[in-house]
Image (cartoon, grey):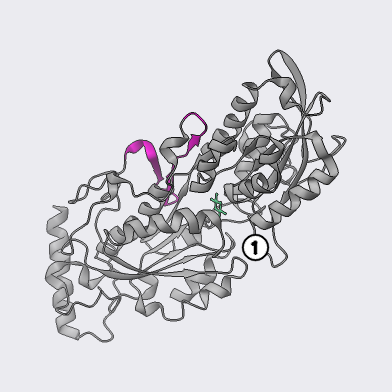
Amino acid sequence: MKKFLALVLALCMVLALAACGDSGSPSNSSNPSAPADSGSNSSAAPSDSAPASSGSVANADKPVIFFNRQPSNSQTGELDMDALTFNDKTYYVGFDAVQGAELQGQMIVDYLQAQDPDTLDRNGDGVIGYVLCIGDIGHNDSIARTRGARLALGTAVGDPNQGLTSVSGINDVDSAPIGTNKDGSAKDVQDGSITIGGKTFVVRELASKEMKNGAGATWDATTAGDTINAWVGDFGDEIDVVVSNNDGMGMAVFNAWSQAAGVPTFGYDANSDAVAAIADGYCGTISQNADVQAYLTLRVLRNALDGVDIMTGISTPDAAGNVLDASVFKYDDATRCFYALNGAVTADNYTSYLDATAPNPAFNNQVSEADAPTAKVWLDIFNSTDNFLNGTYLPQLQNYDGILNLDVEYISGDGQTESNITDRLANPDAYAGFAINMVKTDNAASYLNKLQ
Ligand code: BGC
């Protein structure tokens, strides 16, 4: 029935195009179930081999996929539903930040509990001191990870921004950086406790800081590498553990100090270099399944372009056999968000994660040009130096762009200013769809305005 309707719609479009010529034809906004691209149905495909163009579709009606940075208020975390419902082909693709953050916290505690308590407490003062590298205080992934670590380590206090004085779940936790906290008097954390091998220790967050460089780029690995030297100057062998919101910063600390010092270090992302470092003492990371996210980013774009069921090749196999296992993602229809699920990567299992850029055979099959005609799309990565996005996510996108017949123009930003990226979206008419990675989660409008 659906197929029949699609056929009728496609036929109507062909007739409409024939009646009014190519120029000035109306957008299909009044007909949201129509294929986004007039060339996406084989019977209506233009005879030349040009990529399926956006010719008759208004830019405001083209697919828009936000990824990695969820349109949301960076102060409150509230989703920007205006952006997420920009049109009926707008979605977000990310990963489950809370599930991943809880997993990271648990991984750290499991590791600590398996250690010899006397070796772990390096100066024998009865306090397990940790330092925390924060990525971006306005990024919900970063906020969740700070919360997850504090909750697991018993250092969490209620978030004053939400008027909370106690914590009943991860989202209640104060995620503010504390600067330094030598005596345990910082207001945004409290001293926790942990029992290891029958011995109970105080757990103290000695220091935490947003790793932002002078020019404003967040999640900055170089800043983390510099900061650990300062922290070691302040705390020396009081630092027993390093926790980082991501591997870029975690590996900078590992390379600058903690590997040589033999101090357990934990990150997030499962970048190839971090996974390899597990053999050399890096203690663990979390895979946010970049393969699943990269595929979803392009797949949802593809499906929206073709006007097919959005779950094609996702929860239901496409004609080429591509499909995602239900255990690796979830979808929230109310907010139009796809989330990959996370997995812990430790000394127990890291050998199966060594190549973070390998394509996943479950969804690496070439789709046919008849089902999904080549289309030119625009995609930006907010920061050309971000380890995860450039070293893991981008190669994964490049695994799947070809099999989905997407001719992707990749744009790299400077990580600091939105206009550095949006200026390169000067001619949206040239693209059939857009995949957007913002500098700041609040700034969806600066991209969407370009499409109005
Ligand atoms: C990753 C970070 C990355 C950030 C960029 C996060 O999900 O874990 O490594 O820097 O996204 O937005």
What number of labels is visible? 1
Please give the range of residues in magenta.
325-348
Name the residue nearer the viewer: 60 or 328.
328
- Give the residue pinned by disc 1: 217
In the rendering, at what x and y percent does residue 232 appear? 80, 44
Q: Position of residue 282 (x, y in %)?
A: 59, 38
383 w.r.t. 110: above or below: below
In depth, the one of 255 and 365 nearer the eye is 255
Asked whether residue 452 is in view, the answer is no
Q: Relative to the observer, which residue lies in front, 203 or 430?
A: 203
Specify the quadrant of the image occupied by residue 45: bottom left
Q: Residue drawn 38% across and 39% down?
A: 328
Q: Is residue 344 magenta?
A: yes
Q: Secondary structure at mark 1?
A: loop
Q: Mark 1 is on which residue type? A: Ala
User: Does 369 appear above or below 134?
Assistant: below
- Location of the C terminus (image quadrant): bottom left
Q: Residue at x 61, y 70 (%)?
A: 417
Left of 21 or right of it: where is 249?
right
Left or right of 396? Residue 170 is right
Q: Is residue 354 magenta?
A: no
Q: Residues within 10 Å of mark 1 (few under 14, many from 20)?
A: many
Q: Position of residue 95 (x, y in %)?
A: 47, 46
Q: Position of residue 237 (x, y in %)?
A: 80, 35
27 and 284: which is toward the camera: 284
Is residue 89 placed above or below 121 in the rendered structure?
A: below
Residue lying at the far top in this picture: please name it.
198
In the displayed structure, 388 sits above or below 442; it is: above
Relative horizontal placement of residue 195, taking residue 331 as reference (left or right)? right
Q: Is residue 277 left or right of residue 46?
A: right
Q: Residue at the spot x=47%, y=67% of the render?
A: 380
Q: Is residue 355 visible?
A: yes
